[in-house]
Amino acid sequence: MGRKRQHGEATATALLDEAERIVEAEGLDALTVRRVAAGIDTTTRAVYTAFGSKDALLVALGARGFDILRAGIEDRPVTDDPAADLAEDGVAVFRRFMIEHPALFRIGVQRALPEPGLAAGFRDAAVDALAGLATRVERLEAGGLLGGRTVPDAVTEFHALCEGLAVLELRSALPPGKEERIWRDALTALVRGFTHPVER
């Protein structure tokens, strides 16, 4: 489910773009195969050929979100300060994703789906994105900067803070004009705090 079929990569991408636009503007209830097709001046057959069903289209949107996150992490440069790099990854990748693709954030990260089981269709994309984040955390582990935490635990803590900050910002609960600074300060404090030993 969620894999594009042979109908042309450009058409499939355009359909996803239109589906994301509809969900962002009007919510999931407004998403129909007919509306997506009409939005790019094609037929419903193109949607079914490219994705197979409306549910598969939703799965593809979820996977797209995680693909964007994975690519964002992979494209980020590294310095000799892995802690600063990780904190900045949260701001430059996760926050940017939330701002530019709020509909994908809700579908993929928050699993705001009509059927919870649909999330299984983009599990592989989510795992790949988290694996990319884990490689950044592994740099901290290599430098003895995790305070006894495991890489998976540190990844979970980092992801949880990013998601929480994103939810607050999406509902305008962060002080206006200070959002980016709050993200950076909070993530820096978390990552630097990894050096403190944890009790087991």
Image (tube, grey):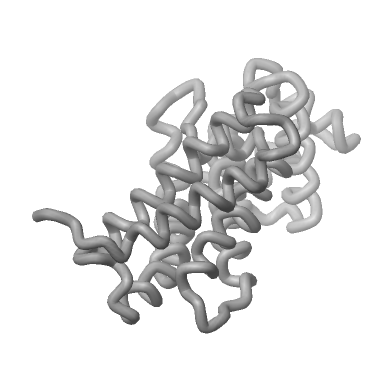
Q: Position of residue 118 (x, y in %)?
A: 44, 34
Q: Is residue 87 left or right of residue 148?
A: right
Is residue 68 shown above or below 104? below
Q: Is residue 138 left or right of residue 196?
A: right
Is residue 4 visible to us here?
A: yes
Q: Position of residue 150 (x, y in %)?
A: 23, 63
The quadrant holding residue 194 is bottom left
Q: Residue furthest bottom?
A: 80
Foreground of the two, 184 or 50:
184
Q: Residue furthest right?
A: 41
Please name the residue shown 55% across and 31% down the image: 167
Is residue 114 shown above or below 40? above
Q: Residue furthest top?
A: 29
Q: Is residue 128 left or right of residue 12?
A: left
Q: Is residue 113 left or right of residue 143?
A: right
Is residue 52 visible to us here?
A: no
Q: Position of residue 117 (x, y in %)?
A: 38, 31
Please name the residue shown 57% across and 37% down the image: 166
Q: Position of residue 27 (x, y in %)?
A: 67, 20
Please name the residue shown 59% across and 43% down the image: 182
